[in-house]
Image: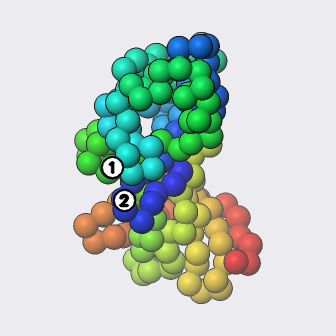
Amino acid sequence: MSEVTDTGRFCVGIITKPVGIKGDVKIHPYTSSPSAFLLYRDHLMLDSRPLSCISSRLDRHTGIIARFSDFQSRDLAESLRMKRLFVQRQSFPVLQDDEYYLYDLYNLEVISDLDNISIGRVAAAFDYGAGAFLEIILYANNELTALPFHKDSVISVNLVNKQIKIDRKFLIYNRPT
């Protein structure tokens, strides 16, 4: 999920174009998979207005085809082009103990495995399909570094204390911020 609003709504996709004449639209999901997007079909919002999804299905080209109750013609569907779709945080599925939403990793204090002291703060978390990465701002030199987010590089995550303990040998690049 790429964007969060100041009201706690998370962007889960964007309507790219109308499909056909009955009001169907193609949606590019921002979720971990197109099928994961379908979990939110009953919780979607356009800006701050709830949308009633009357049909949705996976498209053969890795997208979603959906129809909304208030947009059942091609002309009405055209008005949705490039509109972002949001959900509230409470709509998210409950995760297993060792799973995290990338958004929850932002601003965690980064603790080094070597000396158990704070070395920086998580500035961003990304997943472009090959695995998640954290961008970390190091306190010592104000440089930005990256860390792959997997079981070898991340020793522990404590969301209550807002800390993540890492294995420093997995830090992979530095550049000035």
The part of the image, by quadrant, that contains residue 6 is bottom left
Residue assigned mark 2: 8
Percent position of residue 113, x then y? 44, 69
Amino acid residing under circle 2: Gly
Quadrant (top left, top right, bottom left, bottom right) of the C terminus? bottom right
The residue located at (43%, 19%) in the rendering is 56
Q: Secondary structure at mark 1?
A: strand
Residue 104 tag number: none
135 in relation to 137, above or below: above
Residue assigned mark 1: 88
The residue located at (36%, 59%) in the rendering is 8
90 in relation to 20, above or below: below
Using the numbered discs, state the Cα–Cα distance from disc 2 to disc 1 in whole angstroms: 6 Å
Q: Residue 177 vs residue 165: left or right?
A: right
The residue located at (59%, 64%) in the rendering is 135
Q: Residue 119 vs residue 143: left or right?
A: left
Amino acid residing under circle 1: Gln
The part of the image, by quadrant, that contains residue 5 is bottom left
Q: Residue 113 vs residue 162: left or right?
A: right
Contact check, label 2 and label 1, Cβ < 8 Å: yes
Residue 85 makes an appearance in the image:
yes
Q: Secondary structure at mark 2?
A: loop
Percent position of residue 89, x then y? 32, 51
Percent position of residue 153, x then y? 50, 55
46 in relation to 115, above or below: above
Residue 62 makes an appearance in the image:
no
Question: Considering only order in the chain, which callout, 1 or 2, is on the residue closer to the N terminus?
Answer: 2
- Out of 2 and 47, give the one closest to the viewer: 47
- Out of 130 and 172, give the one closest to the viewer: 130
